[in-house]
Image: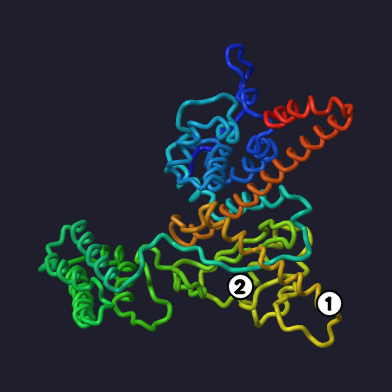
Amino acid sequence: MLKLLPQTLKNNQPNLFHNPLQDMLDSKDALVALSDTIHWEHFDKSFAKYYSTEGRPAKPIRLMVGLLILKQLENLSDERVVLQWKRNPYYQYFCGLNEYTPALPCDSTELVKFRQRIGTEGVEEIFAMSVSLHGKASEEKQVIIDTTVQEKNVTYPTDGKLAIKMIHQLHRIAKEEQLQLRRTYIKEIKGHRISLRFFRHPKKIKKARSAMKRLKTIVGVLMRDITRNLTQEQLKKYQETFDLFTKVSNQKMKDSHKVYSLHESHIYVIAKGKDHKKYEYGTKASLVTTMKGNIIIGAVAHNKNEHDSKTLTSAIAHANKHRSKPIVEAICDRGYRGKKEVDGTVICIPDSPKKRDTKYQKEQKRKKFRRRAAIEPIIGHVKSDHRMQKNYLKGFVGDEINLLLACSAFNLKKWMNDFLLVIFILKTLIILYVLANIKREDREKYVDMYLILFRLW
């Protein structure tokens, strides 16, 4: 449901009894500098189309966008970022407030509704902003591309778990529609659940298979019992659910396009060759980073488990959307074999040196492919620091939104680190300049004083 378009946050008039929030904060803090650098008015104009002219007034757009960014920057949940906003004046300044407010900005569910309102298109605007902040550094001719897995927050899938969940959902449907089942099988299910424990043990395989077969039979019996007692309108309401249950009950071990989760039926299994984790359940994601600057300029979630070479088209197209000039060369690993050029972009893959290559060409290729490994720690930071390790947002749209927000947070964090580095270099140069202009015999007297000032600054 659309809400009334919110008013933009404006600075309050000067108050004799209250100091502005800006005067109480460290102006050299990276979060304050980032807040002053972002063009918040752009979001007010871009997101205005998602709001109505009637209804209850919504929360300010800058507040909601700021909370989404802070959540990914600090690796917080919806509940935690709202609570931390109340306690942290820097968070409040980042979201556009002029005075400290000792109250929650909104309910945590408002963030869920805001993500649903703006969708993938709106989150793209936030990602584009995070790339544009780096200016010319994001316009490098050479990029690095790699894929990773964005795992979904689902339990480890087994046929037994899926069968028991289907039975519980069928019981819930019968209760909602006030149907009297001929038999519920509740006591029998408890015994089959115990039989499925340690089903890989040689002495328990036979019993576990028998229990699994019986559970699937119970699913079919309950479905037929419910469908016989439902009207045509009620059947239409639950038809998709029944079709999904039928597909899960009939799927075999070696079938393709299997269902691994009832509430996240779009996920698939990916084997990336990891020793500690043979299979991962979620969606594949492509990341495109600049060669030298390590800026993420492209991020795409794939709804199918395709070969890496087939993901290049969408990854390069997404990266080119945030640049003024197209990518000239993309450096990939051997998993991208099969493609030499995509939409005018040359694809470079490590290979044995050729006889016709000169010594200089061999050295350049060696440096180039050694540099390719720089994307691996970037993927690690995006996962561990910015909430891409496990995705808690629902559906494939949730996969796209979480990926884009995580990459946006990485770019903004990099901008903040670069800002702090510039401040550190300026402080060092000023102190060295002052010390260089002091007489040698007086230099020792002032060194300790300037070191203390350096720490306080």
Farthest residue to the left: give it. Answer: 182
Q: Is residue 445 left or right of residue 270?
A: right
Sequence-first tag of 1 and 2 = 2
Q: Which residue is mark 2?
A: 311
Residue 30: x and y, percent?
66, 38
Q: CA distance from mark 1 to mark 2?
A: 28 Å
The relative height of residue 245 versus residue 53 in the rendered view (above or below) is below
Rendered residue at 69%/58% (across/down):
294
Q: Nearer the viewer, mark 1 or mark 2?
A: 1
Looking at the picture, tell me which residue is in the foreground, 4 or 88.
Answer: 88
Q: Residue at x 50, y 45 (%)?
A: 114
Which quadrant of the structure image shows residue 416? top right
Q: Which mark is residue 361?
A: 1
Q: Decide if residue 193 is on the left or right side of residue 97.
A: left
Please report the residue visible at 61 percent of the width from the left and 77 percent of the height from the top.
335
Position of residue 58 relative to residue 144, above or below, is above
Q: Quadrant of the C terminus?
A: top right
Q: How far across and how far down the image is residue 456, in percent? A: 67, 28
Q: Is residue 451 left or right of residue 357?
A: left
Q: Nearer the viewer, residue 103 or 278?
A: 278
